[in-house]
Amino acid sequence: MEELKVEKAIQDIYPDDIAWCYGCGRLNDDGHHLRTGWHGDKTITIYTPESKYMGIPGFIYGGLIASLIDCHGTGSAALALHRKNGHEIGDGAEPPRFVTANLNVDFLKPTPQDVPLKAIGTVEEIHPKKWKVETEVYAQDTLCARGTVVLVVMPSTFLNKND
């Protein structure tokens, strides 16, 4: 597997009031800090899980894989809609934020511990406020999981502003 790094991630520019997700929130000290960016016309997240996310010795537990696919999906949809709206990461525009409506994960092979995981996503708009992301998760060159996430633009009611 080629060495990749996500240089510009959509999560890096989420506003502070919505940057707390356990999976991808940069402000959550206990979270995974997943970061999603463009890799050609696909999206990519690279993450090496800590050993505490073990299912059985030598392998990652499935919940971590589901979390990776889920947050990769929300980030991917945000990237795609941000680009559709004429923006790129770093241009100063606030990106859209998505929430998960449906998550489906197929576990294909045991996911080994202590190796970087690479989530590669394909984004499809199915409605102006509803998107679908197909994700494949690789450990080295082995496809370990495949998932589909259906996402909706985050409703304004999710923001708890005490103004």
Image (cartoon, grey):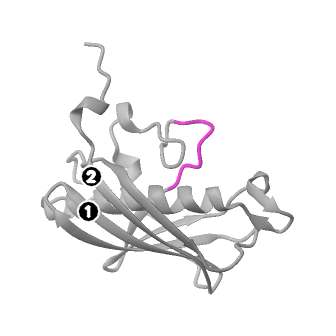
User: Residue 106: x, y in percent?
Assistant: 55, 73
Image quadrant in which you'd find residue 4: bottom right
What residue is shown at x 23% (from left), y 45% (from top)?
A: 94
User: Residue 22: x, y in percent?
Assistant: 54, 42
Task: Compare residues 3 and 149 and report the one nearer the observer.
Answer: 149
Looking at the image, the residue that sits furthest to the top is 163
Q: In the figure, 91 relative to 38: above or below?
A: above
Region in magenta:
28-34
- Left or right of 30, for residue 94: left
Mark closest to the chain's N terminus, 2 or 1:
1
Label 2: which residue?
152
In contact (CB < 8 Å): disc 2 and disc 1: yes
Looking at the image, the residue that sits furthest to the right is 57
- Left or right of 113, for residue 28: left
Q: Is residue 29 magenta?
A: yes
Element carrying mark 1: strand
